[in-house]
Image: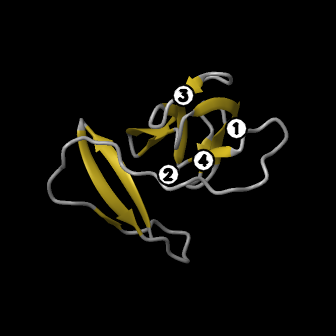
């Protein structure tokens, strides 16, 4: 299971997504009432060998969708929680944020590209 925080019309919801073996959509559980807007705790990034020219910190898509906007260019300094890429899923714009402070080392996607959950969208140093 994965935990996500989603903002809809200014209301913040914590959701839990169960990953199934089938290729279909996973069931989503959401609270009945929104909670006050606050940043969700983020898990530490996974350590892996970066691609050539890429940074060591991965910024991954939390949900499948289409890249709507690139919010930070290569070389831009970002703080934890700053939007790096925005994806669109089910007519919602979902910002994908920096898991920690850093500098954008690479952008791995382009506007309009379809992405799956877990795909690396950008890297940070």
Seen in the image, is 35 located left or right of residue 96? left
The residue lying toward the viewer, choosing from 3 and 124, is 124
Residue 107: quadrant of the picture: top right
Which is in the foreground here, disc 1 or disc 3? 3
Q: Measuring 43% from the left and 68% from the top, which residue is drawn there?
A: 26
Residue 49, horizontal then vertical, whole percent: 79, 53
The residue labelled by disc 1 is 108
Mark 3 neighbour class, 10 Å CA radius: few under 14, some 14 to 19, many 20 or more: many
Q: Secondary structure at mark 1?
A: loop
Q: Count the labels in the image.
A: 4
- In front: mark 4 or mark 2? 2
- Cα distance between the residues tagged 1 and 2: 15 Å
Marks 4 and 1, the one that precedes in the sequence: 1
Q: Residue 7, image x and y in percent?
A: 31, 42
- Residue 46: x percent and y percent? 63, 57
| Quadrant of the image containing the C terminus | top right
Q: Are marks 1 and 3 in contact (CB under 8 Å)?
A: no
10 to the left or right of 98: left
Disc sitting over residue 115 in the figure: 4
Q: Which residue is mark 2?
A: 62
Snapshot colouring: secondary structure
**Element marked by disc 2:** loop
Which residue sits at x=34%, y=47%?
A: 6
Which numbered circle lies on residue 15? none
Please say if the residues under marks 2 and 3 sit with CB atoms less than 8 Å apart. no
Q: Which mark is residue 78?
A: 3
Q: Nearer the viewer, residue 65 or 73?
A: 73
Q: Name the quadrant containing residue 9.
A: top left
Whichever of callouts 4 and 3 sits on the residue coming sooner in the sequence is 3
Task: Specify which label sits upstream in the sequence, 1 or 3.
Answer: 3
């Amino acid at each position: 299971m994965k935990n996500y925080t989603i903002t809809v019309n200014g209301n913040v919801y914590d959701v839990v997504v169960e990953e199934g073996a089938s290729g279909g959509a996973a069931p989503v559980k959401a609270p009945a009432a929104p909670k006050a807007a606050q940043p969700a705790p983020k898990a530490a990034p996974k350590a892996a060998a970066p691609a050539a020219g890429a940074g060591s910190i991965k910024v991954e898509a939390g949900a499948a969708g289409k890249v709507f906007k690139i919010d930070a260019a290569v070389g831009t300094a970002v703080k934890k929680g700053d939007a790096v890429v925005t994806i669109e899923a089910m007519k919602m714009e979902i910002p994908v944020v920096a898991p920690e402070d850093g500098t954008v080392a690479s952008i791995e996607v382009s506007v309009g590209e379809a992405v799956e959950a877990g795909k690396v969208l950008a890297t940070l140093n």
